[in-house]
Image (cartoon, helix red, strand yellow):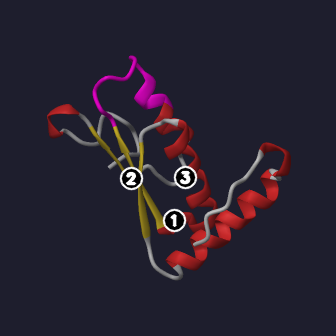
Amino acid sequence: MEVKELTMGKLNPKIFIEEKIREIVSTVESGLAINALSGGVDSSAVTMLGHRALGDRLKTYFIENGIMREGEAKQIVGWFRFPGPERVDRPGGKTGSHYPGIL
């Protein structure tokens, strides 16, 4: 993959998104991919691009780190219901049932 400098004046979001989706599809081909979602800008952008490119062939794991604001983890999980995130890890190794629809 070629690394290119992208200045704001030359940024065309539609073309950028289309290029990234093609790159993801080309890299993953017919396989599956996984990603971790923290709720930050970077992992949220990767999650959205990945799901647009791969649909249910991208398995997203949301990691609750235990230091989020009250209700923030549930809000983030709610934003990404397409069909993931697949799992929520919480402090103490507990997973899942706290968030409906999450394994």
Residue that carries the numbered disc 2 in the rendered image: 86
**Which part of the image, by quadrant, shows the N terminus?**
bottom right
> In the image, what residue occupies the spot 49% across and 29% down?
75
Q: Mark 1: which amino acid?
A: Asp
Query: Which mark is first along the chain, 1 or 2?
Result: 1
Q: Is residue 67 left or right of residue 12?
A: left
Residue lying at the far bottom in this picture: please name it: 30
Q: Residues within 10 Å of mark 1 (few under 14, many from 20)?
A: some
What's the distance in space between the residues labelled 3 and 1, CA to CA? 15 Å
Between the C-alphas of marks 2 and 1, the distance is: 11 Å
Give SS at disc 1.
helix
Q: Secondary structure at mark 2?
A: loop
Give the residue at x 51% y 82%: 30
Q: Residue at x 50, y 76 (%)?
A: 28
Looking at the picture, how far across and down is residue 6, in whole percent? 73, 53
The quarter holding residue 93 reads top left
Q: Amino acid at mark 2?
A: Glu
- Tell which circle, 3 or 1, labels the residue nearer the N-terminal end: 3
